[in-house]
Image: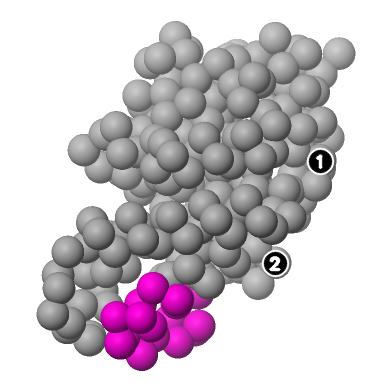
Amino acid sequence: MKNNQFIKAVIFDMDGVIINSEPLWQIAEKNIFSKLGIPVSEKEIKESSALTVIELCEMFYKKYPWGDKDFKKIEEQIVNEVIQLIKTNDTEIPGVKNILKFIRKRDYKLALASNSSHDLIEVVLKKVGVKEYFDFIVSASNLPKGKPDPSIYIYTAKNLGIAPERCLVVEDSIVGILAAKNAGMSVIAIPRNEDFNKKDFDLADLKISSLNLLPHILKIFKIKTN
């Protein structure tokens, strides 16, 4: 980022950033693939957490080919199960509403850009109660490619009316960081505890261990906090 440019927008990823949904995705994926007779392990599911559901289907199909190759149908089943798990589990990231209020009060644009489907995004925003804080919300299902392709972040910046170099992205995954950096944006990464020291996350401009630290480090990115 150029030193003379202030950040004017903050763009949040959803899964793993404003809601702790990653464990629920793992449960749903393991359940649905097990019903198909695919012997996937928790280790395989965790190690492939950065993949989209379709990419996950493609990966497992190469290893354990099954009869019905309708990946979209499998994706729908997994998403529906995740939606039910979100509705019935406490998944909110502590402090997320206060963080969004903090940024909103300082007149910065706020957006949500997620690889998840519109239906899932709507369920999450209703569950956490934060939809009103966002100026723009987009699912990668609107676009030809999801993260790590940068198009979702370029599209978000365009709809906010803010240049990419004046956008700050909050991400928890390598694919999200790659998408944001390739879009020309600054990135704060909040990796899972077990991933914090992985070198891939060094691509981010800064790593933090908790979303609650965000207000304390925003000045690094020249966001006015007074």
Question: Looking at the picture, does residue 37 appear above or below residue 163?
Answer: below
Q: Is residue 65 left or right of residue 19?
A: left
Q: Is label 2 in a helix, a strand or a loop?
A: helix
Does residue 84 appear in this view? yes
Q: Residue 44 lies in magenta, yes or no?
A: yes
Q: Residue 52 lies in magenta, yes or no?
A: no
Q: Is label 1 in a helix, a strand or a loop?
A: loop
- Numbered label attached to residue 76: none
Comparing 66 with 149, the one in front is 66
Does residue 165 appear in this view? no
Comparing 13 with 205, the one in front is 13
Residue type pointed to by label 2: Asn
At 72% from the left edge and 27% from the top edge, which residue is drawn?
100
At 43% from the left edge and 81% from the top edge, which residue is drawn?
44
Which marked residue is nearer to the observer: mark 2 or mark 1?
A: 1
* Range of residues picked out in magenta: 30-47
Chief secondary structure of the magenta span? helix
The residue indicated by pointer 1 is 95
Residue neighbourhood size for the residue with mark 1, other residues' Cα within 10 Å, grouped as few (<14), some (14–19), many (≥20)? few
The residue positioned farthest toward the bottom in the image shown: 39
Residue neighbourhood size for the residue with mark 2, other residues' Cα within 10 Å, grouped as few (<14), some (14–19), many (≥20)? few
Q: Quadrant of residue 196?
A: bottom right
Residue 60 pos. (x, y %): 27, 78
Q: How far apart are marks 2 and 1 (CA)?
A: 18 Å
Instruction: Give the total number of marks visible in the rendering.
Output: 2
The residue indicated by pointer 2 is 193
Question: Looking at the picture, does residue 33 appear above or below residue 223?
Answer: below
The quadrant in which the C terminus is found is top right
Residue type pointed to by label 1: Gly
